[in-house]
Image (tube, coloured by chain):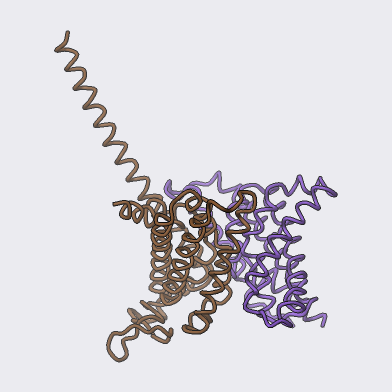
Chain colours: A purple, B brown
Amino acid sequence: MLTNIISIALGAILINNFIFSQFLGICPFLGCSSKVDTATGMGIAVVFVMGLASAICWVVDNYLLVPLGLEFLETLAFILVIASLVQFVEMFLKKSVPSLYAALGIYLPLITTNCAVLGVVLLNVQNTYNFLESVVYGITGGLGFMLAIVLFASVRERIRFAEYPECFEGFPICLVSAGLLALAFMGFSGMQIF
Amino acid sequence: MNFKRQLKEGVITNNPILVQQLGMCATMAITTTLFNGVGMGLSVLIILTCCNVVVSAIRKIIPGEIRLAIFVVVIAGFVTIVDLLLQAFIPALSDALGVFIPLIVVNCIIIGRAEAFCQKSSVGASFVDGITQGLGYTCVLVVMCVVRELLGSGRFGGGLIDIARGFRFTLDGTGAGIQLFPEDYGASILNLPVGGFLTLGFLFGAMQFALRRSAKKKELAEKAAAEKAAQADAEKEEVVC
């Protein structure tokens, strides 16, 4: 049981990192990574929402959709759950933890269209995880995202001083350096867990 | 004529991936064989066109505050339809693309077009926009697939083309493709996730290079025209004097 949880956690953070090996959540990864502190804010918001979404969608799937035989509505139901969850979290934070709300700022509403969130929920169903495994996978997947985006933001801060061909300015050079980071993360792929 | 302009916009000057920088997750994840690329591209084209038409048709009756939620429901509905159809008729494609078919729901291209174009355009224009933007998306996917497959494993058209018994297209993903050079000579890194980042990065670079050059050319031409006009003006003034 415990080894199972640990292997899911390590797998989600390092081996099958959401960004570098599964390509989920690339848009916010490239969009919100120009500074380390905004990247950290985005990362925390994603960890929070991914954990919550995994838990709620697991309950919705197992106690609502499966008993009623409505599995084909999973995508529709999950995206609605995520959208309303994000809205709810936003209102809740605004009211009760204004400091965190101010820190997360505009990143919260953006998370609705982050494919890592919908991706983790769909993968939970695909891998038939139980409740605990789903939540662990959600949170650690978010942590993997945060690790990736913070690392990448610090790389990007250095890119500004680098010399590269003019036509690579902006997006292309970011993609190439993200590719090199992915290459580094590939080193984990041979890792055997237990 | 409008169609021609929109086609040029969708494929080149306002390409959803290379210029608008939308929907990159799937672009890098699934472009390992031509079969996947064409399948994904056409799925997005169909979903985008349907969503564009519906969003444009209901644009006057939906309240502005909750429009995004409505867009998402419309998109999720069409994605579910396409997902089920693929599972039923092309299961190989459905297996190969896996979680990325349902993830079209959160593909920014579709919601981006709904928000930026269909909200203020007629049904006909939105329909054309769906097709042209979808074509632009498909083109990029196909280029990515061809580059990654060719350099990565020396093959062309994996899954889609079979030449074992004459040239034919295989729609069930079983075709072996055309082997142009032995697989061992390929840079297999391009088949790995890293290859997705690098290929797209270089494609972006090439696009920026081309766009900049054409902009510069235009600028030079404009400058030359302006100079000519100024000269003509000066001559005229001399005559007047």
Q: How many marks?
A: 0
Residue at the right extreme of this rendering: A96
Residue at the bottom extreme of this rendering: B165
Residue B228 coordinates in the image, percent (x, y): 21, 27
* On screen, residue A69 above or below B215: below
Residue toward you, A121 or A169: A121
| Image quarter of the C terminus of chain B | top left
- Asked whether the viewer can see residue A154, the reply is no
The reply, left or right, for residue B121 in relation to residue A115 is left
Residue toward you, B89 or B100: B89
The reply, left or right, for residue B184 in relation to residue A156 is left
* On screen, residue A72 above or below A159: below
The reply, left or right, for residue A57 in relation to residue B119 is right
Residue B105 falls in which quadrant of the image? bottom right
Residue B103 coordinates in the image, percent (x, y): 58, 68
Rendered residue at 82%/83% (across/down): A1
* On screen, residue A189 above or below A159: below
Residue A185 coordinates in the image, percent (x, y): 62, 67
Residue at the left extreme of this rendering: B239
Residue B160 falls in which quadrant of the image? bottom left
Residue toward you, B186 or B167: B167
- Asked whether the viewer can see residue A71, the reply is yes
Residue B111 coordinates in the image, percent (x, y): 54, 57
Rendered residue at 40%/83% (across/down): B171
